């Protein structure tokens, strides 16, 4: 597994960084292009969480926070990586990532918000840009030494490469990062407070990370020097938060969706011990009875106990109408029992409360597709399509549904988009070529050919170069 990861990471570094080998400081256009390229590599290399509900929740939370960031020439985007290591990081161009392990470690929305705000602090302060200006070129031999260290079993180097930071190059030349982390903490606290969360949520989140380290659990807090020590950060964040206490705090802010996101992740991982801990600690954490009912329902569903799953999830739904985590989960139980009418009734009720919600339209579309109502399914998928970044397989469903309706050009185009998105270039090329063969107009052919050229050009750029030149270290920012 480590060897496979190293091959991927080496490819990322040579392709992405090599493309900017002569750049010691990025202008805006180059920064955006670099961000897009790194994002594509992350998509192809790391597994994003396949939960539209959690993805949408994190994106909405990030959007609320980013309203209080200094104006940027790009829109901030937030993504969830399916990885148990508690971590979050940002890359050029406004992309922010958080691991499922970090979400599950937090106890409330404000703590998660503080982590995202910290990453936005890195982006606002343009730490990557500033580090690039100061960074000396890194010889390929130095990178090879890092990779070799991981291959021969150096755990610190191996963890540095695989922990979600786009490779081991970041562990070199980190002399500026302590100041960067402190600055990002200060900006993050400002963002957190402006959004309406208690400033104390920031040191609270750091305390949870500190407890994990002290308990000797695997993590990446004691070997990476890209931030001040955990204990130090708890201390100075607590001091700053105490001075800000009460100032600008929004008492009416509803953090109620966070536990549902956490429960959804635990359910996807079949983590029954985690669900039991949450249920047992619900009162202490301030979670109400609907949260407990949802957790019990998710746990029952994991065991295949549909009767209890329906009972618990319906109880949660009746007290939390409009909760976009509960309705799809209850509908899923009905679908598994082939009770499509009951599933559609739940989602119809949810859509009546949130008519434009893309996740609800996506879920409704999947039920209609499975039922064989392809025209209706297509209508809902089209309404969900603007949120395609949050819906990992929406293009696949669009393609298969259009295929059932005999719209073969459109079907193969969407299937090509899907396979390009997940990095399967062979199948992407196959479907794009099939789409061209079904295209009836020159305009349609040219549009698909443009996608095909872009895909093939990308494949050519990714071929390893002989005698690669020196290149600067282009890091991601690791936040926690």
Image (cartoon, rainbow, N blue to C red):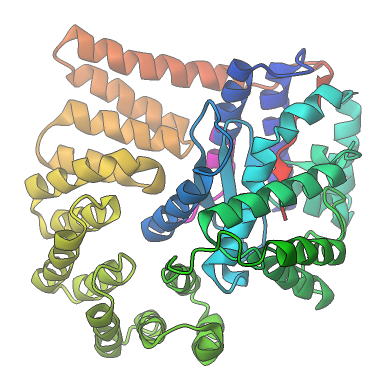
Vertical comparison of 265 with 398: above or below: below
Total numbered badges shown on the rendered structure: 0
Residue closer to the observer: 210 or 329: 210
Q: Using the rendered view, name the quadrant where residue 31 is placed.
A: top right
The residue most toward the top is: 442
Residue at the spot x=29%, y=15% of the render? 447
Residue 248 locus on image (x, y percent): 56, 59
Q: Using the rendered view, name the quadrant where residue 264 is placed.
A: bottom left
Q: From the viewer's perspective, is 223 left or right of 114?
A: right
Residue at the spot x=72%, y=24% of the render? 17
Residue 477 locus on image (x, y percent): 72, 42
Residue at the spot x=55%, y=81% of the render? 274
Q: From the viewer's perspective, is 83 left or right of 378?
A: right
Q: Give the range drawn in magenta.
A: 40-49
Residue at the spot x=15%, y=11% of the render? 441
Residue 149 locus on image (x, y percent): 89, 46
* Residue 434 appears in view: yes
Dominant SS in magenta: helix
Where, quadrant-wise, is the C terminus in this rendering? bottom right
* Residue 219 appears in view: no
Residue 365 locus on image (x, y percent): 19, 53
Vertical comparison of 259 with 70: above or below: below
Vertical comparison of 109 with 181: above or below: below
Residue closer to the observer: 165 or 211: 211
The stretch drawn in magenta includes residue 328:
no
């Amino acid at each position: 597994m480590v060897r496979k990861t190293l091959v991927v990471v080496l490819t990322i570094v040579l392709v992405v960084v090599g493309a900017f080998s002569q750049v010691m400081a990025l202008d805006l256009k180059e920064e955006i292009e670099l961000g897009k390229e790194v994002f594509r590599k992350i998509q192809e290399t790391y597994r994003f969480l396949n939960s539209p509900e959690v993805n949408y929740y994190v994106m909405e939370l990030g959007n609320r926070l980013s309203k209080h960031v200094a104006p940027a020439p790009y829109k901030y985007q937030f993504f969830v990586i399916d990885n148990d290591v508690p971590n979050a990081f940002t890359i050029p161009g406004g992309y922010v990532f958080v691991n499922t392990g970090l979400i599950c470690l937090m106890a409330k929305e404000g703590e998660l918000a503080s982590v995202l705000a910290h990453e936005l602090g890195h982006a606002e302060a343009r730490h990557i840009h500033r580090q690039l200006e100061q960074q000396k070129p890194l010889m390929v031999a130095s990178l090879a030494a890092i990779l070799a260290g991981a291959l021969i079993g150096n755990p610190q180097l191996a963890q540095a490469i695989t922990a979600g930071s786009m490779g081991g190059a970041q562990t070199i030349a980190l002399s500026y990062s302590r100041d960067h982390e402190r600055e990002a903490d200060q900006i993050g606290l400002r963002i957190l407070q402006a959004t309406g969360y208690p400033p104390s949520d920031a040191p609270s989140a750091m305390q949870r990370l500190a407890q994990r380290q002290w308990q000797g659990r695997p993590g990446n807090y004691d070997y990476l020097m890209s931030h001040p020590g955990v204990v130090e950060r708890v201390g100075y964040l607590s001091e700053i938060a105490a001075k800000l206490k009460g100032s600008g705090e929004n008492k009416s802010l509803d953090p109620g969706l966070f536990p549902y996101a956490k429960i959804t992740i635990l359910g996807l991982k079949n983590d029954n011990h985690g669900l039991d801990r949450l249920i047992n600690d619900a009162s202490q954490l301030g979670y109400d009875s609907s949260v407990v009912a949802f957790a019990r329902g998710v746990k029952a569903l994991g065991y295949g106990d549909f009767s209890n799953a329906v009972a618990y999830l319906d109880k949660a739904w009746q007290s939390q109408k409009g909760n976009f985590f509960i309705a799809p989960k209850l509908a899923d139980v009905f679908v598994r029992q082939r009770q499509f009418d009951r599933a559609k009734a739940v989602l119809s009720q949810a859509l009546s409360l949130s008519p434009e919600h893309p996740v609800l339209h996506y879920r409704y579309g999947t039920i209609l597709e499975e039922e064989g109502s392809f025209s209706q399914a297509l209508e809902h998928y089209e309404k969900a399509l603007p949120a395609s970044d949050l819906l990992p397989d929406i293009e696949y469903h669009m393609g298969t549904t259009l295929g059932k309706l005999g719209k073969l050009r459109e079907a193969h185009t969407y299937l090509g988009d899907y396979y390009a998105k997940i990095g399967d270039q062979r199948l992407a090329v196959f479907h794009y070529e099939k789409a061209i063969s079904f295209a009836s107009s020159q305009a349609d052919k040219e549009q698909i050919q443009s996608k095909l050229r872009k895909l093939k050009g990308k494949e050519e750029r990714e071929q390893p170069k002989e005698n690669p030149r020196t290149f600067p270290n282009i890091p991601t920012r690791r936040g926690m």
